[in-house]
Amino acid sequence: MVNNARKPFGYEPIIKREDLKKGTKRKREEVGDWKQAMLNVWRLVDEQRGLLITVLLLVFASSGLTLLGPFLIGKTIDNFIIPMKTDGLAMQIGWLLAIYTGTSLTMYFQNFWMVGIAQNTVYKLRSGLFNHLQKLPVSFFDKRQHGELMSRMTNDIENISQTLNSSFIQVFSSILTLGGTLAVMLYLSPLLTVLTMTIVPIMFIAMRWITRRTGILFKEQQRAIGELNGMIEETMSGQRIVKAFSQEERMKEEFALKSDRLRRTGFWALTYSGFIPKVMNMLNNAAFAIVAGIGGLLVLRGDGIVTIGTIVVFAEYARQFTRPLNDLANQFNTVLSAIAGAERVFSIMGEDAERDAAEANGDIQLKGNVEFRNVSFGYAPDTDGYTVEDVSLNVKAGETAALLGATGAGKTTIVQLIARFYEVDKGTILIDGIPIDELPRATLRSQTAFVLQDPFLFESTVRENIRYGKLDATDDEIEEAAKKANAHEFISRLEEGYDTLLTADGSEISQGQKQLLSIARAFVADPVLLLLDEATSSIDTVTELEIQAALEKLMEGRTSFVIAHRLNTVKKADTIYVMDQGKLIESGSQSDLIAQKGMYYTMLQQSKL
Amino acid sequence: MPMKTVFSYAKPYKWPIVIALILMLTELSVELIQPLLIAKIIDDGITAGNRETIILYGSIMMGLALLALVSGVINSFFAAHAAQSFGYDLRQALFRQIQAFSMSTFLRFPTSSLITRLTSDVTMAQNILFMGLRILLRAPLVVIGSLVMAMLVNVKLASFLLIGIPFLFVFLFVMARKGVGYFSEVQRRLDRVNRVIQENLQAVRLIKAYLRGVYEGSRFSKVADLLRKDTVKAFRMMELIMPILLLIMNGSLMIVLWFGVGVVRTGDAQVGEIVAIVNYAFRITGGFSMFSFLIVAFSRAQASSVRMEEVLLADDDREIMVPGETENGNEKRGALEFNNVSFNYPGHPEQVLSNVSFTINPGEKIAVMGATGSGKSTMLNLIPRIFTATSGEILLDGKNIEDWPLEELRNTIGLVPQQSVLFTGTIRENLAWGDPEARPDELEAAAEKAQIHASIQRFPANYETRVGQKGVNLSGGQKQRLSIARALVRKPAILLLDDSTSALDVKTENALWEALEGERATMIVITQKIHTAQGADRILLLDEGEVAAYGNHEQLMDQSELYRKIAESQLDEEVADDGEQRKETLRLRTDH
């Protein structure tokens, strides 16, 4: 089975020699990271200092009681059993019972509160990470797999949770026991203590050797879980396509590859971390041998420094000494794996939030003048160039602007810039004459409604999905909006009407119906600025015509940007902007553009072919 | 038996498990022998004043310590191998099972829950196996060993220790059972947390556009808080184990001491025996304290096993792939026939399609039109059996599609869905989905037909540009065209386009239809555009799940009021100022 010492069971090693070299750049950065990560977690724990101190006191008490119990039992044997005395035995046993009840109670309550502290910390960490994600720019999400981010919120934080649950008390009580035992050992025989202590440096060397490896491995393991999670999420979300193209085998292969990567890192992480208790056990046994062997030889010397009795008692204490060391070593491992999780969590926390203007312009009621001055923008301008280049346009409050052009011309990008999903690279966008980056996002977005190309519905009722446009909308307002958006009719036909629960997959309603709900959502929002990006592309033209009037009514008195390929949506716009490959090439009213006989005219002709 | 189902995946690792257990026992024996050797050193060495004996036994102790270390280290390898490979196999089995699910079974499980089951739940099962190989046997062995030793010392006194044991077992059993319930609740809460995060990632733009960050934050806090509360509840419950266990064991010890005096007085026991029994009682307590650990792990593993078993045994209607039976060279002609097909989504009684019947000849191009929610997409999904018709039959080349091997059926079909889904990877990889063996020039030819080749060439890395969740920003139209190209790569006998040109401008769309003229495939095209429909051989008009009309443009203009309504709605579109003239144009065109 073990065919090769370097590759046991065929597991390729994960750690390369250069990973362990001291002072490499990667190494130094990582040290900084994990210290910071630990500190950050500690801060959250420390917020509950009162409870934490209570827990520590309880650990102190229970450690004391644990030591007191055997001591009293010894006394009982000496004072009652050996002299065969029953007077006061009941009293003595009563004391013992009290002590043991105390032990159990202190033990229970220290854990009781520690679980609370740990889970509060985890909760804060989770919510903190989530809230931070809300502040990150759209571009952050463009480049990341959903499942990978999800893994940080679940698998990585779960690691921290497990550690906080148990390690804290363990570490503290181990240190206490260690100190106590050491004191007794020194009292019994300084010489034997020093001899026993010779194992400590060996322990340190072994620990270092192991943890340098596990530190890297745990991190790799969390990364592997994250990637696997990413792959699972993506596959499951696109399961229909997988089926339609019968690519199950391919997905299985890809999954096997990622899953194997996790197995490999997991194997090495478990193996190396599994060494720790074994090494500790060995040192434990070795300490025994040292005490018995060398101690024995010392007794033979007969100078009375070491006696048989000392060896017997000492051996027991040496055992007690190594046990907390063993526990500490094990906890060290758990802590390392938590740190691996924490680092991944805090690397997200370290991402820069969307830049935002000061609250100074806070409560501005926007009128809705939108002006682009020589705006250029690219998603990755260095490599891909600009998606929108040198665009200038001016839309007055209350006007409707239509954006037209071939796919990939930059229309969606323009409206996303107005919603400030991205920051322009060159030029400025002015809203009511104020540069967009001096306007707080809240001010801008609270007065904007955006109907996106891909309608998204939450796993909630139809009603709640419409209410998303305005959280305090009444049921009447919601129905009103649904009626305007022509959604009321199909909603009424659903089994439970507005209370129908939509599932994640949303197969119970059609794409067009989803678009109708998105439009209803915009109706409810009652915005100053309305951005419609292919809002009706999946809706049949009869229905579209029916909501056209309502849409026009909605646009009345609001500044609207409309992207549509069907020209009837476009023709009533005050200004039509025609884009081509990121540039604005024509603009004007429908009749102006027809007169110009430019690109718009050509498009109009083509649509009639 | 969920555990049994799940742990059957550990069977292939029987030998590593056995070896790991043997190694663990070796370690344990060394630990138990050590005190005996110390006794030897004291009795035969020190008391007898024999240096050699001391050195001999001292060395033996050292040697045994090394032996324990070596067994321990090797045990690490075997235990890690067994646990990780078991976890790997379990994940594989789960994933394979999920891939074999029919769509309706798949929809029973939210994706967020499937993700938790494939990761967190597998980890729980893996943990208990690993722990088992390291400490599971140790705890009972310590308890049993110490009890036996105590009995040997003095049966009467030791029997007092036995009093507590049945209570302990009942208690542990009850706790383990309760734990399962509590921890499955925790896993369910984790599903919810996962779901809210997933929604937030999918809807980033919507949430930002409506400024709902704070709202989402509070929504998340709610689910995270429930997770916190249930986790706390579960663990606080489990934290009861240790203190109660200690209380029972220490109580038994008190009884030993209480009656000890009497027993010693009657001469049934010696003081030394009491000391020994007290010592063994300590060890038993130590052994039991490992149980509290194990019970938490066991409860979690059991709770997770139930969840995994749900997936593993959900084979009510698994899709059966029979790739071997594909008759190669037997080209499909692409004739399709719907015979009284009705369909409703599982769990939703409303009929989406009712008694749909029509036939399509090989190579024909059919346009499907109808109002939003009239069942167009659903109908298309029935052809590759993404969903199975509730009643009626669909025939491909005269044979019921349920009689075709599933893989063969799907390989004949190129589906372009309404919402373009691309996977993380390069454009080339995404296109090769259509046919993994396609040559580069075939991929490019398909891209060219789909009108996306030129755009791809403008990308910085061409066909190697990364797309999907981690990829570049593609416009809606670019995604649509890539997914059309992906379908074309298959050279399908049947091409299904589900409103897949909605984001394309007229020019690009016209060029696309022109390029598709040359395809010999049977085409079913869902469209909103009358203009596209006109180019089709026939038009299938759906109304509330029923066939309202089936025929070419002229026939439908004549027969169907609904169709005329649709036509007029778009007629208006082209009539900017001068309606009459355009209507004239349309009539001329239709007469043509």
Image (tube, rainbow, N blue to C red):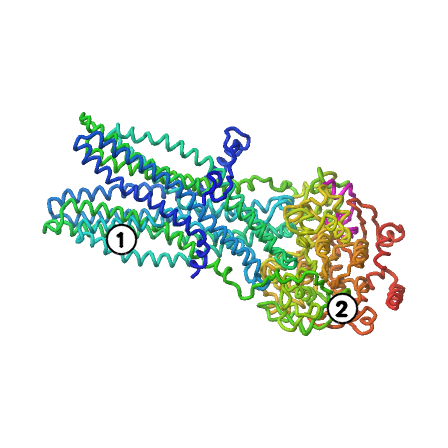
Instruction: Give whichever of discs 1 and 2 has the lower sequence position.
Output: 1
Residue A332 drawn above or below residue B573: above
Q: Quadrant of residue A465?
A: bottom right
Magenta-span inclusion, residue B99 = no
Give the residue pinned by disc 2: B361
Q: Position of residue B245 (x, y in %)?
A: 30, 52
Q: CA distance from mark 1 to mark 2?
A: 82 Å
Left or right: A332 in relation to B549 = left
Q: Check disc 1 and give the amino acid type.
A: Ile
Position of residue B290 measured from the top left corner of the image (x, y, whole percent) = 34, 48
Q: Is residue A411 magenta?
A: yes
The answer for which chain carries disc 1 is B
Residue furthest to the left in view is B266
Extent of the magenta region:
A384-412
Q: Give the number of the mark in front: 1 or 2.
A: 2
Question: Is residue A530 visible to the viewer in this orientation of the structure?
Answer: no
Q: Which label number is shown at residue B248?
A: 1
- Camera-side residue of A489 and A18: A18
Say which residue appears at 69% left-offset and 44% top-offset. Answer: B464
Residue A34 seen in the current view: yes
Q: Nearer the viewer, residue B256 or A17?
A: A17
Report the chain holding disc 2.
B
